[in-house]
Amino acid sequence: MRKLYDLAGADENRRFSPYCWRIRMALAHKGLDVECIPWRFTEKDAISFSGQEKVPVLVDGENTVSDSWEIAKYLETEYPDTPSLKLDQGEVLFIKYWVETTLHSEMLQILVMDIYNSLAQKDQTYFRESREKLFGKALEEIVVNRKERLLHFQKLLTPLRTTLKKQEFVAGGTPGFSDYIVFGAFQWARCISDFSLLKADDSICLWRKKMLALHQGLALNAVGYPV
Ligand SMILES: N[C@@H](CCC(=O)N[C@@H](CS)C(=O)NCC(=O)O)C(=O)O
């Protein structure tokens, strides 16, 4: 059986990694079954066989692949007869870096306390120490101005919003890995926090609804908060 090491909170069914979500969606896109194994930040030993310390890690028969981008490329090469993730368009890489450097970082500063509060106790110290070092302040201080930050975040979404007014999905008429990359970020938020990132009339909501419903509601049925 194919296995995916997947970040979990105190509740092992709360799976909230944006990087793991892109891969879960990509596997479903290709119709590939997977067993998702709950993994906590401090369980580095459990994935040491992959030669690095982060999830997602995919174990597919004899093959072990880590890093969501490498996994997506692996799936395209290894399963050429399944629906394409449309990785061959070079722009996907731009989406990846835009999401990772801009969206994730803004979202983290909005959600960091919600993440902390949802973590298994053994992960909380590690998470607090590593993230406070990253931002140079206490987690509680990072989120104090999150209402103002939200307005800035919603502005950052303008290119996404405008694109989705003109086409059904980020990748065009049908979803591709670009959609899963962007959606992974929104699903991260939905699984960990009840804080609303989008206004109800934001056109991005329509796309998010479609993404939640894909693959028999894979993302919609996950443990999380209503959007
Ligand atoms: N570049 C990696 C990033 C993966 C990543 O950052 N994963 C997080 C979970 S969302 C992680 O495992 N972090 C471990 C840690 O912070 O110690 C990818 O695309 O897969």
Image: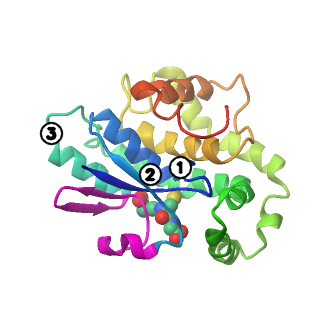
Mark number displayed over residue 20 = 2
Q: Are marks 1 and 3 in contact (CB under 8 Å)?
A: no
Q: Is residue 48 inside the magenta stretch?
A: yes
Q: Residue at x 44, y 36 (%)?
A: 179
Q: CA distance from mark 1 to mark 3?
A: 28 Å
Q: Residue at x 50, y 42 (%)?
A: 182
Q: Mark 1 or mark 3: name the one nearer the start of the chain.
A: 1
Dot 3: element: loop
In terms of depth relative to the viewer, which is nearer, 200 or 148?
Answer: 200
Dot 2: element: helix
Q: Which residue is mark 1?
A: 15
**Above or below: residue 120 compared with residue 102:** below
Disc 1 crowd, CA 10 A, few/some/many (<14, 14-19, 20+): many
Q: Mark 2 or mark 3: name the one nearer the start of the chain.
A: 2
Q: Which residues are magenta?
A: 44-67
- The label nearer to you, 2 versus 1, is 1
In terms of depth relative to the viewer, which is nearer, 127 or 94?
Answer: 127
Amino acid identity at mark 1: Arg
Within the image, what quadrant is residue 168 found in? Answer: top left
Dot 1: element: loop
**Above or below: residue 7 compared with residue 48:** above
Amino acid identity at mark 3: Pro
* Coordinates of residue 128 in the picture (x, y in percent): 69, 72
**Residue 90 falls left or right of residue 185:** left
* Coordinates of residue 10 in the picture (x, y in percent): 62, 58
Disc 2 within 8 angstroms of ligand 1 (CB): yes
**Residue 40 falls left or right of residue 124:** left
Q: Which residue is mark 3?
A: 80
**Residue 141 falls left or right of residue 200:** right
